[in-house]
Image (cartoon, grey):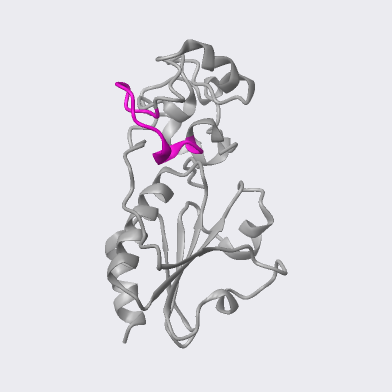
Amino acid sequence: MNTVKINGLIILSLTYLGVGCGSSTNHGRFSALTANIGDQSDLCSHQVPASACTRCDSSRAAAFKKVNDWCSPHDLPESQCFACHPDLSFEPLPKAPDDADLKSVTPHPLNQALADIAVKSKVTIIDFWAMWCIPCRKTEGDLNLLLTHNNNLAVRKIEIKGWDDPLVGRYLGGTAKLPLLVVFNAQGDEVGRVSGQKPEELAQLLSKAEK
């Protein structure tokens, strides 16, 4: 299984952990200590949120180590290690309009059909994402831009807590990485899926859904 990284999940991070580093056993997992700050903090000279950077304030390191968010080879939080995760970025994302049809949802009951989550009369993208997933954050920016230019588009976001999340077995099937985007047309029919950040493939599915 390909693994990428997205919050207390060592599983998603394995693909990136081999970059410029030793054994993956020396690495931790992404926690919410950096991710929850996100765009809400200015970036420091190390290009991470200033209010979370351990190189700016070493007293913060203990909190990261306590939750195993620590990269031993580079002596800094895993969630701030650009050497291990070169695609990592904390640059501000494009914002969705205030009136965008954008909601976070939780399937209920667990076996709820995705078609029941899709918005009838609109093309809908159901976005399976995780906090510890770098491509998920970039895809969020892509989706926000789409919502800016398309009033007939709806986005429903479903958070995956980890690969042992029951939602994975119910909805992700053999998907090996996140994000997973499921596209429905305005009639509520699924027209296709995109696994990973692939804006060109998503654009093709949206064009198909709008026909």
The residue lying toward the viewer, choosing from 160 and 196, is 160
Q: Where does the image place residue 35, in percent across and percent down from the top left?
A: 48, 37
Residue 148, percent from left and from top: 30, 65
In the image, the segment drawn in magenta is 35-49
- Residue 123 appears in which quarter of the rendering? bottom left
In this image, 112 relative to 197: left or right? right
Q: Is residue 113 left or right of residue 178?
A: right
Q: Indicate whether residue 115 is drawn in magenta.
A: no
Quadrant in which the C terminus appears? bottom left
Q: Residue furthest top?
A: 58
- Work out whether 205 lies above or below 133: below
Q: Is residue 42 magenta?
A: yes
Compare residues 189 and 56 and report the one nearer the observer: 56
Q: Give the answer, above or below, for where 15 lies relative to 116.
A: above
The residue positioned 63% from the left and 26% from the top of the image is: 67
Indicate the position of residue 153 as horizontal and vertical percent values: 38, 74
Q: Is residue 27 visible?
A: yes
Residue sitting at x 41%, y 43%: 134
- Note whether 85 is above or below 183 in the view shown: above
